[in-house]
Amino acid sequence: MKKLFTLLMISLTLLLNSCDKDDDSPKDCGCNSETIEEITVLEEDNLVATISYKIQLDTGDTHYNDKFWIGVSFENCPTCIDVMIVCNENFLNGEFDYLKTNTDEFAQIHFSGNIKKICNRPPNVADYSYYRIVLTSIEKL
């Protein structure tokens, strides 16, 4: 009986001290994680940056749906693409909301922001890199 009581107390202690949903402390990944890099994409960088809105493509597609995605392609590696899923969509102030109804469209942009590690990498080719981003500036071209 004493062992059962001790086991219950340990379990209760672990349960009460586990992850708190209201905890705003940095995580290992996602929007609240530490910044791994600051990025700025301007015209002189010879990079192509676009923003689009991703919807669920099929029932097996559970990766960051109903979110704005930024893609950056590189002039010297046309198959290499950095994909950044926007954390702070309110920063867009509705400027790109038309992409929600025209999900096949892209808008070319210049932007800057803080890159975060992604928690769940969508399956894709190795030339694609995925991140989360907290935008600090964005300009539609």
Image: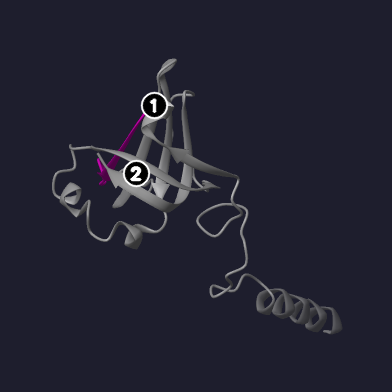
- Amino acid on which the number 2 mark rests in the picture: Trp
Residue 123 placed where, x, y %? 43, 33
In what quadrant of the picture does the C terminus appear? top left
Direction from residue 7 to residue 91 in the image, left or right? left
Magenta-highlighted residues: 47-58
Number of marks drawn: 2
Residue lying at 44% horizontally and 16% vertically, measured from the top left: 77
Element under label 2?
strand
Q: Residue at x 61, y 54 (%)?
A: 34
Q: Secondary structure at mark 1?
A: strand
Left or right of 46? Residue 139 is: left
Q: Amino acid at mark 1?
A: Ser
Residue 69's tag is 2
Closer to the camera in the image, 52 or 40: 40
Q: Quadrant of residue 97?
A: bottom left
Pick the quarter of the image with the N terminus: bottom right
User: In this figure, which residue is indicated by the disc labeled 1?
Assistant: 73
Q: Is residue 75 magenta?
A: no
- Residue, far right: 2
Residue 67 vs 124, above or below: the answer is below
**Whole-number angstrom distance, CA of label 1 to CA of label 2:** 13 Å
Q: Is residue 111 visible?
A: yes
Q: How is the image coloured?
A: one colour
Q: Which mark is residue 113?
A: none
Comparing labels 1 and 2, the label whose residue is closer to the camera: 1
Q: Nearer the viewer, residue 47 or 127?
A: 47
Residue at 46% x, 40% y is 40
